[in-house]
Amino acid sequence: MKINEEIKIFGFIGSPLQKRSNTYTLTKMMIDKLLEKNRAIEYSLFTAGDVNIQSCTGCWSCMTHGQCPLDKKDDMAFLKEEMMGSDLIIWGSPVYALHVSGQMKTFLDRLVNWYHTLRLAGKSGVTVSTTAGSGLEEVHQYLRLLLSVSGVKTIYSLDTIGTLPSTIVDPESAQKSADKAANEVYTFLNGEKRIESDKWLEYSFQKMKDKVMHKDALNADYEYWKEHEMLEMNSFKELLQKKL
Ligand SMILES: Cc1cc2nc3c(=O)[nH]c(=O)nc-3n(C[C@H](O)[C@H](O)[C@H](O)COP(=O)(O)O)c2cc1C
């Protein structure tokens, strides 16, 4: 990414438990390890319990007019601004009923026009989850897919076992996993490794280009592609070259 410039990390964890959330705690372990490597890293980390995010009302305004009416009423505009200004995007969720939590889904639903416009293209991503036993892969896969359609390259997926609030079952092994994640993630943050396109990002690019070109109801998304000279591009690789 960049060596002497400011590095900013954004994290959203779909748990209502604030600092008692196991998923938050695991994420914070990784961030603290990154901070040990570079004190200049800035981060903002929120759980669903820290912010007010209302459920999508299904009005289509984000896709037709480029504006979500709810953005004026809750914290989503702020969270979007934070994500736009960050280099690394962390999306985390506890496993609830074998999937992401309802709170995480509410957050993700509010970003639907970002998926049509690959709004976060050029950024790196990490998925985080905790579970009492099942559903980890379902959560990681889903979060990785939605990061891809946002244009974000997932560089790591981190998880551990957790049960009651503030109860990571094996904190020592969780710390080891978080340290390993931080070591890998830092190679991208310090510019040693560069993100590259992959089949999911290319699939997302082609799928979304096709969608905005052929659906009249997505006027605002189409305009975004036009304004950002993306309609002339033929691959995510081309978009990445422009962004990096
Ligand atoms: C409503 C609810 C649903 C859950 N569903 C599952 C599940 O399907 N499988 C599982 O192994 N654990 C399940 N769990 C356990 C959580 O995944 C686990 O406690 C996790 O660490 C909670 O993360 P948090 O502290 O970040 O909220 C569930 C917990 C709750 C509260």
Image (spheres, grey):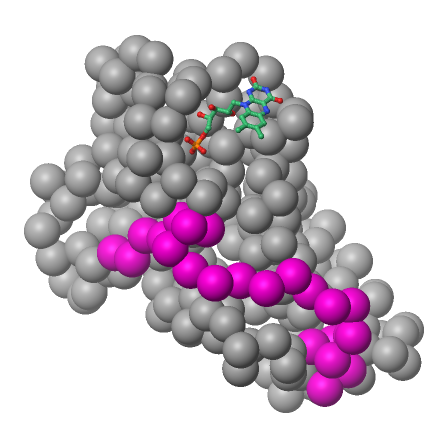
Task: Please state if 165 lies on the left or on the right of 219 as rendered.
Answer: left
Residue 177 position (above or below residue 51): above
Q: Of residues 192 and 136, which is closer to you in this image? A: 136
Task: Please state if 121 lies on the left or on the right of 57 as rendered.
Answer: left
Give the quarter of the image for residue 3.
Answer: bottom left
Q: Measured from the top left, where is residue 216 in percent x and y?
A: 89, 80
Q: Is residue 48 magenta?
A: yes
> What are the residue bounds of the magenta stretch?
43-65
Tell me what residue is drawn at x 18 percent, y 39 percent: 32
Q: Is residue 244 shown to the viewer in this render?
A: no
Tell me what residue is drawn at x 20 percent, y 59 percent: 42
Residue 23 position (above or below residue 134): below
Magenta part, dominant SS:
loop
Residue 125 position (above or below residue 64): above
Q: Measured from the top left, where is residue 53 in percent x and y?
A: 53, 62
Give the quarter of the image for residue 106.
Answer: bottom right
| The N terminus: image quadrant | bottom left
Tell me what residue is drawn at x 24 percent, y 27 percent: 179
Q: Measured from the top left, where is residue 52 in percent x and y?
A: 48, 63
Q: Of residues 167 and 119, which is closer to you in this image? A: 167
| The C terminus: image quadrant | bottom left
